Amino acid sequence: MKKSELYWKELHIGSIVETNWDMRSSGDISFKFDYLAEPSENKHLADYIKFSIKYSILLGEGVEEDDMYLAEQEEETTFLDLTIDTTDWFIVNEKGEKKIILCLIFHEDDEITWMTDPKYF
C-alpha cells in the first residue's frame, strides 16, 4: 500500500494510505488537524471538508448529482477556490515526490478519493 502526505498549499492535512487505484485513487486519511474543532484557524478549509463529506453521503444514498447541485449550489460556490482549477492540493509520496491532485472528495469514516493531475506528472 502506498503512503502519502496530503497538503493544501503548505498546510499538512493528513497522511493517506492508498487502498485502491483505478481512474481515481482512494484510501484512508489520518487528519493532522481537527476539522471539526470550533473555532478552527482554518475554518474555510474545515467547512469544505465537512461539505465534501455531506456531498459524498448524498451520492452514496443515490441522490442524483444534478439534484444535489441545485440544492447545494449556493454553499458549493463558497468553495470554488478549493475545488475548481486549483493546483493547491498535492500529495508527497514516501520518496518525497510531489504530485498535484484534483477532484478531491472527503468521505465519512476517514476515507478520501482523488485524481492525479496528468498535466503535472
Image (cartoon, helix red, strand yellow):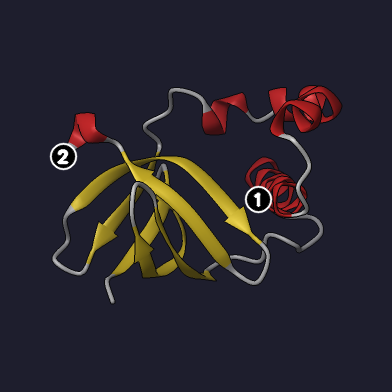
The number of numbered badges drawn on the structure is 2
The residue positioned 70% from the left and 54% from the top of the image is: 60
Q: Secondary structure at mark 1?
A: helix
Sort mark 2 into few (<14), some (14-19) or many (20+) by Cα contacts within 10 Å: few
Q: Which mark is residue 49?
A: 1
Residue in front for this viewpoint, 84 or 9:
84
Which quadrant of the view contains residue 77?
top right
- Cα–Cα span, label 2 and label 1: 26 Å
Q: Earlier in the sequence, mark 2 or mark 1?
A: 1
Relative to 120, is 18 above or below? below
Horizontal side, residue 78 vs residue 106: left or right: right
Sort mark 1 into few (<14), some (14-19) or many (20+) by Cα contacts within 10 Å: some
Amino acid type shown at disc 1 = Ile
Which quadrant of the view contains residue 57?
bottom right
Q: Quadrant of the N terminus?
A: bottom left
Residue 62 appears at what percent x and percent y?
75, 47
Q: Quadrant of the C terminus?
A: top left
Which quadrant of the view contains residue 44?
top right
The residue positioned 31% from the left and 65% from the top of the image is: 4
Q: Which residue is mark 2?
A: 121
Q: In front of the other: label 2 or label 1?
A: 2
Horizontal side, residue 94 vs residue 77: left or right: left
The residue positioned 79% from the left and 55% from the top of the image is: 39
